[in-house]
Amino acid sequence: MIRGEKVILRDKRTDDAWEDYAWEIDPELSRLDAAPPLKMSYTDYLEEYTNEFLYYYSNGRRFAIDTLKGKHIGNCSYYNYDETKGDTELGIMIGDRDYWNNGYGFDAVNALVNFIFTTTELKRIYLKTLNWNDRAQACFGKCGFRKYGELSRGGYDFILMEYPRSDWEQRHAEKTAEAP
């Protein structure tokens, strides 16, 4: 469990399936995730979802995002973990619209970044976000990510952003120095 100021990141559970399914069939959320809405039945989804827990997620880790009161509002993860290159990719989605634009995504990203950099020796965390998703880009920038490129894939145009460990260490040292 990873605690932020507004959220708790916890391991995924099978009882998260219904919310995850609802978010994956939602056309707007799917568009924000650069994916088509899921078309399978909940029964099929639940079987596939349950089977995912049987396999170790070897190249990263998935988390549910809960409020401090325990409400599941989204998911985040790191994946494409590469010790040789020293980097990993970060992803996040706040699926519950009631929690948009209130700092929950910002807090979740900060908590996950802090977790990654304090528990690994990775040199960089990177992500991609849709080039028109200004809200996400602003959030990631506020967290410390910076643009380093662009990518077109599968009919989508993305902004590539990264957060080098050196930037995080400097920012973390400044926050520690400011603390009373």
Image (cartoon, rainbow, N blue to C red):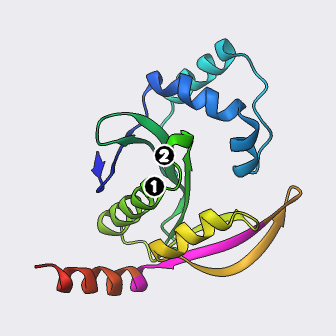
The amino acid beneath tag 2 is Tyr
> Is any atom of residue 57 visible in this view?
no
- In the image, residue 106 lies at what x, y percent? 45, 61
**Is residue 179 rendered to the left or right of residue 100?**
left
- In the image, residue 136 lies at what x, y percent? 61, 63
> Is any atom of residue 163 visible in this view?
yes
**Is residue 94 rendered to the left or right of residue 28?**
left
Q: Give the extent of the magenta segment.
A: 158-167
Residue 165 is inside the magenta segment:
yes
- In the image, residue 107 lies at what x, y percent? 39, 59
- In the image, residue 126 lies at what x, y percent? 57, 70
Secondary structure under the numbered disc 1 in the rendered image: loop
Secondary structure under the numbered disc 2 in the rendered image: helix
Number of numbered discs visible in the structure rendering: 2
Q: Name the residue under label 1.
A: 102
Residue at position x 68%, y 63% in the image:
129
Residue at position x 18%, y 86% in the image:
177
The amino acid beneath tag 1 is Asn
**Is residue 39 rendered to the left or right of residue 88?**
right
Q: Is 86 placed above or below 97 here?
A: below
Quadrant position of the N terminus in the picture: top left
**Residue 5 in which image quadrant:** bottom left
Q: Is 107 placed above or below 174 here?
A: above
- Residue 99 has which mark? 2
CA separation, marks 1 and 2?
6 Å
Q: Do the residues labelled 1 and 2 touch (CB within 8 Å)?
A: yes
Secondary structure of the magenta portion, mostly? strand
Q: Is 160 placed above or below 23 here?
A: below
